[in-house]
């Protein structure tokens, strides 16, 4: 059963919170209590007597996001095989992608965190931002219903899917590079990777070494992302006609 649709989103916050401004622009209402719950991280709940957390809403929002993105992929790319659709979906609904979107929507400063998480930069921690974004989708669904939350998902994520397709995000660039090396008689590519930054905001810079030549570096939020980006840049240099978006 959905929460009342007559409760408007909090007007005082609309102007300085892009997420609420977007909801208002789309004519979507969100129950203030559910909105507050969606922003309640377990660290805050633990320090405040074990109050409810946003984890159940996150569970709901994750499923909604999967449905919305999958629906768009199926309809927008009728010629792509299932495996490629799955890779595109993974790129768009990844923790990194959700974290970036959360920063654009100004979600981080609104999250209610425990003191420990606050001290370690939790308001800008990618995993927390991603989880909270999913929880907010869950809150919108319970407040406004499935059609409205899917409208929100399509508004936010359809452009990300299109961009991922243009940039080749659904491609396993490490495999492409490895196949190129095998075809040209080179040893398998090696990756030089260096990590930097605090634990809560770690970055990894990777470069692909192909036949003794180092290619352009790529910096990512984890080793896998950095190596994929480095491979893509190497492929772009070695195969200029390839569609890499690098």
Image: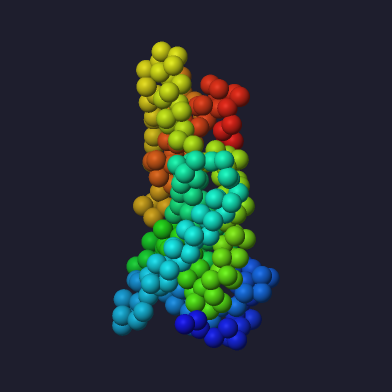
Q: Whole-percent x and y of residue 226?
A: 44, 39
Observer-nearest residue: 243 or 203? Answer: 243
Q: Residue at 68% of width from left, 70% of height from top?
A: 25
Q: Residue at 38% of width from left, 41% of height from top?
A: 223
Whether residue 213 is situated above or below residue 30 in the rendered picture: above
**Which residue is the extreme one toward the front?**
78
**Which residue is the extreme one toward the top?**
185
Tell me: 113 left or right of 32.
Answer: left
Q: Quadrant of the C terminus?
A: top right
Q: Residue at 34% of width from left, 71% of height from top?
A: 43
Q: Residue at 44% of width from left, 54% of height from top?
A: 95
State whether residue 97 appears in this view: no
Total marks in image = 0
Observer-nearest residue: 90 or 53? Answer: 90
State whether residue 148 appears in this view: yes
Q: Quadrant of residue 191?
A: top left
Observer-nearest residue: 220 or 31? Answer: 31
Q: Whole-percent x and y of residue 73?
A: 55, 50
Tell me: 131 left or right of 19.
Answer: left
Q: Whole-percent x and y of residue 222?
A: 40, 45
């Amino acid at each position: 059963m959905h929460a009342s649709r007559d409760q408007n989103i909090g007007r005082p916050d609309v102007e300085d919170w892009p997420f609420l401004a977007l909801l208002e622009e789309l004519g979507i209402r969100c129950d203030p209590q559910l909105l507050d719950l969606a922003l309640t991280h377990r660290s805050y709940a633990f320090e405040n007597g074990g109050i409810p957390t946003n984890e159940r809403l996150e569970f709901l929002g994750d499923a909604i996001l999967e449905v919305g993105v999958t629906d768009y992929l199926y309809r927008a790319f009728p010629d792509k095989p299932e495996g490629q659709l799955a890779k595109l979906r993974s790129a768009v609904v990844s923790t990194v992608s959700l974290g970036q979107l959360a920063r654009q929507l100004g979600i981080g400063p609104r999250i209610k965190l425990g003191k420990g998480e606050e001290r370690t930069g939790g308001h800008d921690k990618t995993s927390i931002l991603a989880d909270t974004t999913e929880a907010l989708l869950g809150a919108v669904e319970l407040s406004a219903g499935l059609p409205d939350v899917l409208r929100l998902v399509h508004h936010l994520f359809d452009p990300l899917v299109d961009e991922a397709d243009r940039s080749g995000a659904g491609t396993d660039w490490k495999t492409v590079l490895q196949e190129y090396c095998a075809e040209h008689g080179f040893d398998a590519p090696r990756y030089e990777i260096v990590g930097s930054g605090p634990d809560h905001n770690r970055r990894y810079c990777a470069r692909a070494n192909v036949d003794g030549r180092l290619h352009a570096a790529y910096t990512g939020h984890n080793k896998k992302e950095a190596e994929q980006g480095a491979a893509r840049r190497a492929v772009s240099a070695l195969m200029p006609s390839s569609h890499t978006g690098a």
